[in-house]
Image (cartoon, grey):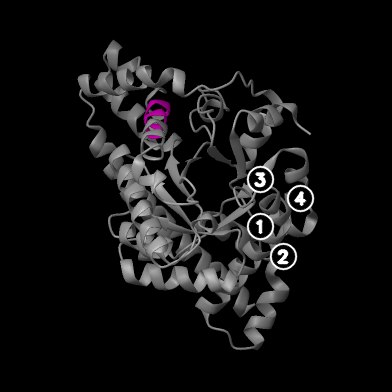
């Protein structure tokens, strides 16, 4: 087992793998990552499923059976993706049991084309929850304005949720408000709050990718000095908000409730000039999740140095970075609005690619 990843886990970080395929399930690769790399959860998204289905061979037998049965395209997509998630949930069930539901989680996302439609998102989330039929499943809902009431509704019904595509602190606070409102509704309905779990997926590397372009366009020494710093600073302020909200009297009044942990998503380093473990090493603190693509997981296993909490001692510096960003003229609200729009669009495109892959498989 990787000592680096064991140290990371001991520091309070739950290591989840941002990847899933039927090949990884069948070959034992997922189980090996759990045993050797301290992986205690899995996240998926339309891009991951599109890549897996495009390879085809692992899904050929199922697609042949679905085609013979006259399954619709949508039914075939649901069958393929939920089967993978259900099997991954079963592989991670010992982790789920050992951690009392804290980890051992597998996420599946609603159709991203519904990102701006509340009622259809709720309807599909309910259907996915029933179809996967595993207590360690998380249903992913995007943190769009239309997604917020869907979060409250689903949590209020006892459905565990992974809130995805969060870029700004303001939106993150709205997500936590939606979660608390859902817990209050669930409590009023007599649901055992200890059975409800949620994570809030805060996207990291994409922040630097966009902000760095704007800093380089400004070109001053003060602007250039901020490159590669803003994503980490923004994430650290998210953790500060998490600590504030889940130490509040409002949360304490909810018996047995679990805090909605912050999850670092998009943690693969996109700029080769930066450390390939930047968004792991700089975001270590108790009760966070880091969902890593395979390359980042391997890099962390190889050369990550864990020195303890790297977030809370640096909160003041994070505020200073964000103040400096505003001072050089970068409109961070515009950055996060743009990134949300781009992310929703990218996942919708990936969903169309997934539909195309399944169509080809059914026709074959």
Horizontal and vertical percent for residue 56?
66, 65
Q: Secondary structure at mark 2?
A: helix
Quadrant containing the N terminus in the rendered view? top right
Mark with earlier residue (2, 1): 1
| Between marks 2 and 4 in the image, the one whose residue lies nearer the viewer | 4
Q: Which residue is mark 1?
A: 21
Mark 1 or mark 4: name the one nearer the start of the chain. 1
Where, by quadrant of the figure, is residue 314 drawn? top left
Q: Tell whether label 1 touches label 2 (CB within 8 Å).
A: yes
Q: Which circle, 2 or 1, is nearer the viewer?
A: 1
- Residue at mark 4: 31
Q: Which residues are magenta?
A: 232-238
The mark nearer the N terminus, 3 or 4, is 4
Q: Name the residue carrying label 3.
A: 40
Q: Residue 230 or 119: which is nearer the viewer?
A: 119
Residue 299 visible in the displayed image: no
Residue placed under numbered mark 2 in the picture: 58
* Residue 22 picture quarter: bottom right
Foreground tag (3 vs 1)? 3
3 or 1: tag closer to the N-terminus? 1
What's the distance in space between the residues labelled 3 and 1, CA to CA? 16 Å
């Amino acid at each position: 087992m990787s000592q680096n990843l064991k140290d990371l886990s001991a520091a309070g970080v739950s290591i989840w793998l941002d990847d899933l395929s039927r090949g990884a399930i069948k070959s034992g690769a997922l189980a090996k990552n759990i045993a050797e790399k301290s992986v205690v959860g899995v996240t998926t998204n339309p891009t991951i499923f599109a890549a897996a289905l495009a390879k085809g061979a692992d899904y050929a037998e199922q697609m042949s059976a679905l085609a013979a049965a006259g399954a619709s395209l949508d039914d075939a997509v649901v069958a393929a993706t939920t089967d993978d998630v259900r099997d991954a949930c079963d592989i991670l069930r010992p982790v789920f049991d050992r951690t009392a539901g804290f980890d051992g989680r597998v996420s599946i996302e609603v159709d991203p084309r519904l990102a701006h439609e509340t009622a259809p998102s709720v309807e599909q989330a309910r259907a996915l929850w029933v179809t996967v039929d595993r207590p360690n499943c998380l249903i992913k809902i995007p943190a769009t304005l239309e997604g917020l009431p869907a979060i409250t509704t689903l949590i209020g019904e006892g459905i565990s949720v992974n809130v995805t595509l969060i870029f700004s602190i303001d939106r993150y606070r709205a997500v936590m408000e939606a979660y608390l409102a859902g817990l209050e509704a669930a409590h009023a309905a007599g649901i055992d709050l200890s059975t409800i779990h949620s994570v809030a997926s805060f996207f990291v590397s994409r922040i630097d990718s966009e902000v760095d372009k704007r800093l380089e366009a400004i070109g001053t020494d003060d602007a250039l000095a901020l490159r590669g710093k803003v994503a980490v600073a923004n994430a650290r302020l998210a953790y500060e908000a998490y600590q504030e909200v889940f130490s509040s009297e409002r949360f304490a009044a909810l018996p047995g409730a679990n805090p909605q942990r912050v999850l670092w998503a998009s943690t693969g380093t996109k700029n080769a000039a930066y450390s390939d473990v930047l968004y792991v090493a700089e975001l270590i603190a108790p009760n966070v999740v880091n969902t890593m693509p395979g390359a980042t997981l391997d890099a962390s296993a190889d050369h990550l140095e864990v020195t303890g909490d790297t977030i809370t001692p640096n909160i003041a510096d994070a505020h200073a970075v964000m103040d400096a960003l505003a001072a050089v003229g970068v409109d961070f609200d515009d950055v996060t609005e743009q990134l949300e729009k781009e992310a929703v669009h990218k996942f919708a495109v990936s969903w169309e690619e997934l539909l195309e892959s399944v169509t080809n498989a059914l026709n074959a």
